[in-house]
Amino acid sequence: MRCPFCRGEDSRVVDSREVEEGQAIRRRRSCSTCGRRFTTIEELVLSVVKRSGVTEPFSREKVVRGVRRACQGRPVEEDALQQLAHQVEDTVRSLGVSELPSHEVGLAILGPLRELDEVAYLRFASVYRAYSSVEDFEKEITDLRAARRAAQAGAEQNAESGRE
Ligand SMILES: [Zn+2]
């Protein structure tokens, strides 16, 4: 990489450290020509393969944009969107692959989005799973209710065992 000051081609690394929990390395460089210092970042690129076959780097910002659309008019804070995107990134990075199909990213969004806002989840899922009928929605809502009941039952059980 050329020096941003003098365009010199040679530089040496004076310091390097892991950032983003080891997903990237930041290097401090010193230009061999002018002696000025600059920083470079080398990061592991996780590629997302779109349905068209085109690949693009995974982007948290893109996850946020997709989820934000589903959250329109819902009481969801920007912070929660950012947090969700981080969670999605952790999930897809922990798969231990360098390339993954875009629907895997969608799948990683569904879980945390359901926790965040059920209406936004239904909107997102209807696009992601390509619902084609009212019955598809009904089934999804039935599943949601069942999951909510199961969670409540679990909480009550915990409360009961706590009393013993
Ligand atoms: Zn230079």
Image (spheres, helix red, strand yellow):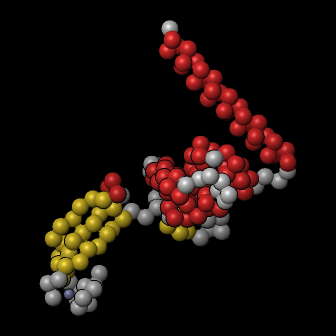
User: What residue appears at the point 70 percent right and 48 percent down from the top-left corner?
Assistant: 119
User: What residue appears at the point 39 percent right and 62 percent down from the top-left corner?
Assistant: 44
Residue 158 percent coordinates (x, y): 54, 19
User: What residue appears at the point 61 percent right and 65 percent down from the top-left corner?
Assistant: 50
- Please say if 109 is above or below 35: above
- Please say if 70 is above or below 113: below
Instruction: State which image quarter holds ligand 1.
Output: bottom left
Q: Does the image show residue 103? A: no
Residue 27 percent coordinates (x, y): 24, 69
The residue most toward the right is 134
Residue 65 percent coordinates (x, y): 58, 64
In front here: 10 or 62? 62
Residue 87 percent coordinates (x, y): 49, 50
- Please say if 155 is above or below 46: above
In front here: 10 or 21? 21
The quarter of the picture where residue 20 lies is: bottom left
Query: In the rendered view of the protein, which quadrant contains the N terminus?
Result: bottom left
The quarter of the picture where residue 63 lies is: bottom right
The residue most toward the top is 164
In front here: 37 or 77? 77
With 70 as the anchor, is 58 left or right in this view?
Answer: left
The residue most toward the bottom is 6
Q: Does the image show residue 90? A: yes
